Image (spheres, rainbow, N blue to C red):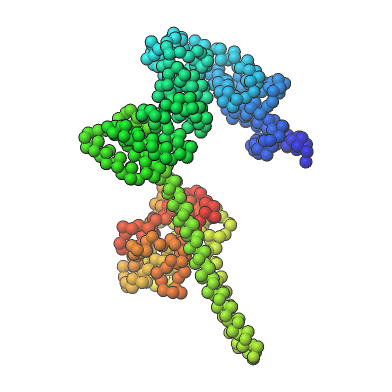
């Protein structure tokens, strides 16, 4: 279908949905169409249509965001720009003066950040200039601060007023910075004030403006704090182009032993995948700051992050010595220490995730191997049976011999079918979600399984007796409880006690979860087997008495519904499991299980 015809068709459908009051459906269609046709010359129409629909819903903040998106997509055309202008004036009639000012600044900032066509940017500035000019000299700080920016002689007062404005009236502060600081001439007399404005722009998320000032004042003085600001902002925006230009212009900064610079160079060289340079920087930092416990701890964290374990151990010894001497983590560089600590935590999570992935791959490999073995044996039996009787039938056909063939094949296929049925909860594509009482279902599973044994032999306890509801797949839940009950019953039978045999289930309801404690007084699980119980086909039962799939299936079914199961290693009277299940299911893709 021709793109223009497709657009016209979508517009008609959107109008029909809007007229029918189906605004959410109309919005969804616009958003999806914007993505489907993002490369088309007509794509700008969808954001403005979406914005108009949100206006009709009276969700003006969302509407304004889509109007800005429209402006970013249009080409240089005054007539098309007027569509945006109409929406801007419509918002002005709805919003308070302060709100429209914030929108005007957001608009200006986003267009500058996206390097939009200069002519469209100028049209925008002309459109919003009256609103921006309304805030000049609104506050006492605004009037006073103008007298403080001429030179650094009153730097401390400037910082005091700027902080107050940033907290109480950041819209006016943005306007002041843009008008008085951003494009003024740089010289050494105003260096400290301009350098402080870098951090203000950074906090206001005007990163490109912060970089502009930083690179300009760096030509006056290669102050380490300014160099660090450039590298930090480049790290934040994930683009080190300006930082690389700074290194080319001022190569001496790589040799500085200033912690401000060294700290950011660690991240810079990591981004360049130059781990040898990272190691060199950390070694230099460690040696240059041997008396600072804060910096030593930061270096230790980086060593751990990059896997330099011996170096981390060495640094740990120095940290212990400094601690014994009464040294404490100081306020200076505390932020860097905490950030490096977070990096270690992130690395541990990454390694844990990788370990979990490896465990999953190993489990899949074990499962595949086990299935191949379990299915391979009956298939081999069938093949040899058929071959044997095939030769026999060539000599003499016997009706009884034929029945023996059929019986053997049926027995082996039943065996294969049983294995596949056991694994079916993990391979089924159906996820039935409904609300059910877990206490009631546990009671039913106990009643069902207890019919197989003498109730005088094993006592069952479940508490509390009240209903506790969760949402999930009740069939999967039944499978979990049944498998645990069967394991517990077998374990108690192995213990061969004639009394004192107990299976107890305690359910605790929390705000978002339900915790289940399942315990039995059977033989328990030995220490050497605790790490294997969730492995597929692992079993301590005699050959032919169990496939070793019960806990493997439980673990996967719990994971599929967003829950977890743990073995209590401290329990010595049998086996005890802790289970946590969310009240609302968080289904995991079945491909990720096993």
Quick one: quadrant of the N terminus? top right
x%, y% of residue 301?
36, 39
Residue 158 in sight: yes
Residue nearest the observer in this picture, 18 or 325:
325
> Does residue 292 sit above or below 135 in this rendering?
below
Q: Is residue 98 above or below residue 9?
A: above
Image coordinates for residue 286, horizontal then vertical, percent: 33, 35
* Quadrant in the rendering for residue 149: top left
Residue at image position (64%, 87%) is 393
**Exactly how many numbered labels are in the figure?**
0
From this view, report whether residue 205 is shown above or below residue 583.
Answer: above
Residue at the bottom extreme of this rendering = 396
Residue found 74% across the figure and 35% down from its top: 7
Residue 291: x, y in percent? 27, 32
* Relative horizontal placement of residue 140, taking residue 399 as reference (left or right): left
Residue positioned 39% across, 72% down in the render? 454
**Residue 505 at x, y percent in the picture:** 39, 59
* Front in this rendered view, residue 459 or 70: 70
Q: Residue at x 24, y 38 (%)?
A: 321
Does residue 482 appear anywhere in the picture?
no
Residue 136 to residue 451: above or below: above
């Amino acid at each position: 279908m021709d793109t223009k015809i497709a657009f016209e068709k979508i517009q008609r459908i959107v109008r029909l949905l809007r007229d029918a009051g189906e605004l959410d459906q109309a919005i969804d269609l616009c958003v999806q169409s914007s993505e489907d046709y993002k490369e088309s010359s007509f794509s700008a129409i969808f954001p403005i249509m979406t914005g108009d629909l949100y206006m009709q819903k009276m969700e003006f903040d969302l509407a304004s965001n889509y109007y800005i998106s429209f402006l970013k997509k249009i080409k240089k055309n005054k007539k098309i720009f007027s569509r945006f202008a109409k929406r801007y004036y419509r918002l002005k009639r709805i919003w308070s003066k302060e709100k429209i000012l914030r929108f005007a600044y957001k608009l200006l900032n986003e267009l500058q950040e996206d390097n939009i066509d200069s002519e469209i940017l100028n049209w925008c500035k002309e459109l919003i200039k009256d609103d921006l000019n309304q805030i000049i000299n609104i506050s006492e700080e605004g009037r006073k601060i103008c007298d403080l920016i001429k030179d650094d002689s009153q730097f401390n007062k400037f910082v005091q007023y700027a902080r107050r404005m940033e907290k109480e009236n950041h819209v006016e502060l943005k306007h002041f910075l843009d008008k008085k600081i951003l494009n003024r001439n740089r010289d050494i007399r105003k260096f400290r004030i301009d350098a402080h404005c870098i951090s203000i722009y950074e906090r206001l998320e005007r990163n490109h403006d912060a970089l502009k000032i930083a690179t300009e004042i760096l030509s006056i003085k290669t102050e380490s704090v300014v160099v660090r600001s450039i590298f930090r902002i480049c790290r934040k925006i994930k683009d080190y182009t300006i930082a690389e230009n700074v290194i080319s212009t001022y190569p001496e900064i790589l040799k500085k032993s200033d912690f401000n610079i060294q700290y950011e160079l660690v991240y810079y060289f990591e981004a360049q995948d130059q781990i040898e340079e990272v190691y060199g920087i950390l070694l230099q930092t460690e040696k240059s700051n041997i008396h600072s416990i804060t910096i030593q701890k930061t270096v230790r964290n980086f060593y751990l992050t990059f896997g330099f374990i011996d170096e981390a151990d060495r640094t740990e010894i120095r940290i212990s010595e400094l601690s014994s001497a009464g040294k404490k983590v100081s306020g200076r560089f505390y932020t860097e220490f905490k950030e490096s600590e977070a990096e270690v935590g992130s690395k541990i999570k990454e390694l844990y995730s990788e370990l979990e992935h490896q465990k999953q791959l190993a489990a899949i490999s074990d499962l595949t191997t086990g299935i191949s073995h379990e299915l391979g044996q009956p298939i081999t039996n069938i093949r040899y049976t058929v071959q044997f009787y095939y030769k026999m039938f060539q000599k003499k056909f016997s009706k009884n011999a034929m029945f023996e063939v059929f019986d053997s094949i049926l027995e082996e296929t039943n065996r294969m079918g049983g294995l596949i049925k056991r694994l079916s909860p993990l391979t089924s594509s159906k996820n039935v979600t409904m609300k059910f009482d877990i206490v009631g279902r546990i009671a039913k599973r106990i009643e069902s399984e207890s019919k197989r044994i003498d109730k005088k032999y094993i006592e069952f306890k479940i508490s509390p007796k009240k209903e506790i509801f969760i949402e999930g797949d009740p069939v999967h839940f039944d499978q979990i409880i049944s498998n645990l009950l069967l394991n517990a019953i077998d374990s108690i039978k192995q213990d061969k006690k004639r009394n004192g045999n107990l299976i107890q289930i305690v359910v605790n309801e929390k705000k978002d979860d339900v915790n289940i404690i399942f315990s039995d007084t059977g033989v328990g699980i030995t220490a050497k087997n605790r790490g294997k119980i969730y492995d597929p086909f692992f079993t301590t039962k005699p050959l032919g008495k169990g496939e070793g799939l019960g806990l493997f299936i439980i673990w996967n079914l719990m994971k599929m519904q967003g829950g977890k199961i743990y073995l209590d290693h401290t329990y010595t009277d049998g086996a005890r499991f802790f289970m946590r299940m969310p009240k609302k299911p968080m289904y995991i893709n079945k491909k990720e299980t096993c």
